[in-house]
Amino acid sequence: MKINEIIWKGNFVEKIKNKHHVTVFEVEEVLYGRKKVYRVAKGDVAGGNVYLALGKTSAGRHLSVFFIVKRTRSVLPISARDMDNKERRSYERK
């Protein structure tokens, strides 16, 4: 999936940082890097589906990043956390 831009909203940045201890830089590494992407929920608005990206940072951290894709191929990260065991197995099968 090609991404043109990442849109950051303050409330999501704080949640990702404080609750899951993931940095903006780590999320950007996953979204702009090699990743597996899945649609996980159909949005209420056209073009507002929720996706999950599974990827690895340059430091070796395996992350799950949930985001919304806009029509312009801009993405809005809404959450990010360490992968669970099932996600990690799926990512490593790629």
Image (spheres, rainbow, N blue to C red):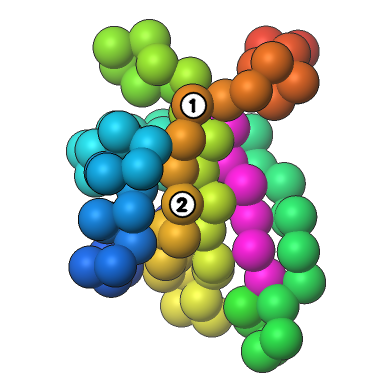
- Mark 2, residues whose alpha carbon is within 10 Å: few (<14), some, or many (≥20)? many
Using the image, determine if residue 61 lies above or below residue 82. Answer: above
Q: Quadrant of residue 33?
A: top left
Which residue corresponds to mark 2?
79
Q: Which residues are magenta?
A: 49-55
Determine the residue positioned at 77% across, 72% down: 42
Q: Disc 1 to disc 2, how far (Cα)?
A: 11 Å
Residue 2: tell me if it is visible. no
Report helix, strand or loop for mark 2: strand
Q: Is 50 colored magenta in this rendering?
A: yes
Q: Is residue 85 left or right of residue 79?
A: right
Determine the residue positioned at 69% across, 15% down: 85
Image coords of residue 23 (percent x, y): 24, 38
Image coords of residue 19 (percent x, y): 36, 43
Using the image, determine if residue 54 lies above or below residue 18. Answer: above
Which residue corresponds to mark 1?
82
Asked whether 25 or 85 is in front, the reply is 85
Asked whether 41 or 36 is in front, the reply is 41
- Mark 1, residues whose alpha carbon is within 10 Å: few (<14), some, or many (≥20)? some
